[in-house]
Amino acid sequence: MFGNLGFSYIGLLFLLMLFIPNIMWSKRKPQGYTSEKENKLLLFFERLGEVLTCCCSLVFSDFNIHEWTLWLLWLIAAFILMIMYEAWWVRYFRSERKLSDFYSSFLGIPLAGATLPVIAFFMLGMYGKVVCMLIATLILGIGHIGIHIQHKKSIDNKN
């Protein structure tokens, strides 16, 4: 139910797919971006969710590929979402890097930069049947997606 302790190379791969573009983003932030005035409760949930999701990704071997079962479809779906997340970043880095580019949708998925990885990590939790990961991604989603919604509304109100 909570998972088997052990290193997850799949979790590491997902984290690399998450962190590498975010590190690149830190030097290529959108014009006018600020993290000021973010809701403190949402920020708390985001930070807590980030820590829990990262830890769960690495310490549960349930995310590694063991044998072919229908549960592997959850992993395939999660991986497809992470590939979509990478494609969204490519589009962002090739854009003019405006706030509207950063809070854009991708293939019909709103706020793709926030929603795609959260859903992918949730599906990873489903694949591994790791309740801790499911809870961690719910906490992360509340904070991370909530903050992105807040920023998007602020942009929409200015326009």
Image (spheres, rainbow, N blue to C red):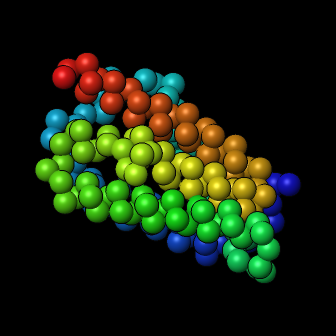
* Residue drawn at the location 50% of the way across and 53% of the way down: 117
Q: Residue 57 location, x and y as percent?
A: 62, 61
Q: Residue 31 location, x and y as percent?
A: 15, 41
Residue 20 appears left or right of 26: right
* Residue drawn at the location 26% of the way across and 58% of the way down: 91
| Residue projecting furthest to the front | 108
* Residue drawn at the location 40% of the way across and 41% of the way down: 111
Where residue 101 sits, quadrant-wise, is top left
Residue 158 appears left or right of 90: left
Q: Is residue 43 something one can see in this rendering? A: no
The number of numbered discs placed on residues in the rendered structure image is 0
Q: Nearer the viewer, residue 154 or 55?
A: 154
Q: Is residue 146 something one can see in this rendering? A: yes
Residue 140 appears left or right of 43: right
Residue 114 appears left or right of 159: right
| Residue projecting furthest to the right | 1
| Residue projecting furthest to the bottom | 67
Against 17, is 41 above or below?
A: above
* Residue drawn at the location 77% of the way across and 79% of the way down: 68
Where residue 159 sits, quadrant-wise, is top left
Q: Residue 90 location, x and y as percent?
A: 28, 62
Q: Residue 75 location, x and y as percent?
A: 65, 66
Where residue 22 sits, quadrant-wise, is bottom left
Against 17, is 27 above or below?
A: above
